[in-house]
Image (spheres, rainbow, N blue to C red):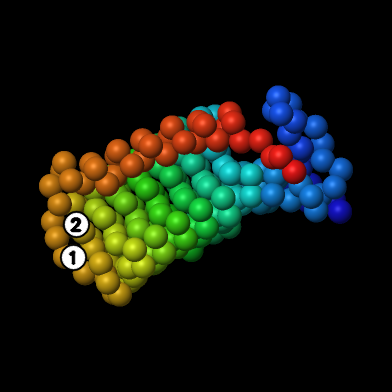
Amino acid sequence: LRLPVVARTIPFHFTRNTVPRPCLNSMMCSVRRMTVYRLGDDEPQLHKDSWVAPNAAVMGKVRMEEGASVWFSSTVRGDNDLIHIGKNTNIQDGCVLHADDGFPLSIGDNVTVGHMAMLHGCTIEDGALIGIGSTILNGARIGKGSVIGAHTLIPEKKEIPPYSMVMGTPGKVVKTLTEEQAAQFGEKGAAGYVERLRQFKSELVPVA
């Protein structure tokens, strides 16, 4: 089984001293691929200190800043407009990020996007936290330091003011946070994931 020529890397098997050698069994090594793809003329621009998990998929018009991370089984599909992931922002396991023409996806600095969230053509400002399983649609804007509760739906073009706590389907503001409260959810949580990505970059080794 051959990988497409546009793939940025091939499957690798890592020995315990982390020196890579080509894996001859692509079925055995499928979870070890670094699936970062060029799509036509569009190649993801990844800062050297960002990280993409081995079985995540990042392709096309995507830019990741320093300390940004995309975790296992997530998809970042930049086949329309730009997807930008800011400094120290984490995209946790199982998320889907996509954009439409005219609706780029912009995620600011120090943002946490919880497991299995779906972000589509929206803007997430600095220090926000997007809860597990939430959906945020085209043209929506999440204000700085806001917290979007788990499984919340933010409809198209909805604007959430800064430092808001939002819950429900559709989402409604239930509380205004202080800057100190927002920092506990946003910047401090994001900083923890920066440390975690460094651990995974240096210590993650397949054992079978």
Above or below 79: residue 185: above
Secondary element at image label 1: strand
The circle drawn on residue 173 is 1
| Image x and y of residue 4, in percent | 78, 51
Give the spatial CA distance, label 2 vs label 1: 6 Å
Q: Earlier in the sequence, mark 2 or mark 1?
A: 2
User: In the shown orientation, is residue 206 left or right of residue 190?
Assistant: right
Q: Nearer the viewer, residue 93 or 48?
A: 93
Q: Residues within 10 Å of mark 2 (few under 14, many from 20)?
A: many
Report the number of discs.
2
Q: Nearer the viewer, residue 172 or 40?
A: 172
Measuring 26% from the left and 55% from the top, which residue is drawn there? 147
- The three-letter code of the residue at mark 2 reads Ser
| Image x and y of residue 6, in percent | 74, 47
| Image x and y of residue 186, in percent | 29, 44
Measuring 45% from the left and 56% from the top, which residue is drawn there? 115
Q: Nearer the viewer, residue 86 or 139?
A: 86
Marks 2 and 1 close (CB-CB < 8 Å): yes
Measuring 58% from the left and 28% from the top, which residue is drawn there? 202
Above or below 117: residue 45: above
Q: Residues within 10 Å of mark 1 (few under 14, many from 20)?
A: some
The circle drawn on residue 164 is 2
The circle drawn on residue 183 is none
**Does residue 23 appear in the picture of this structure?**
yes
Quarter the C terminus occupies: top right
**Does residue 47 appear in the picture of this structure?**
no
User: In the shown orientation, is residue 28 left or right of residue 117?
Assistant: right
| Image x and y of residue 178, in percent | 13, 47
Q: Residue furthest bottom?
A: 169
Secondary element at image label 2: strand
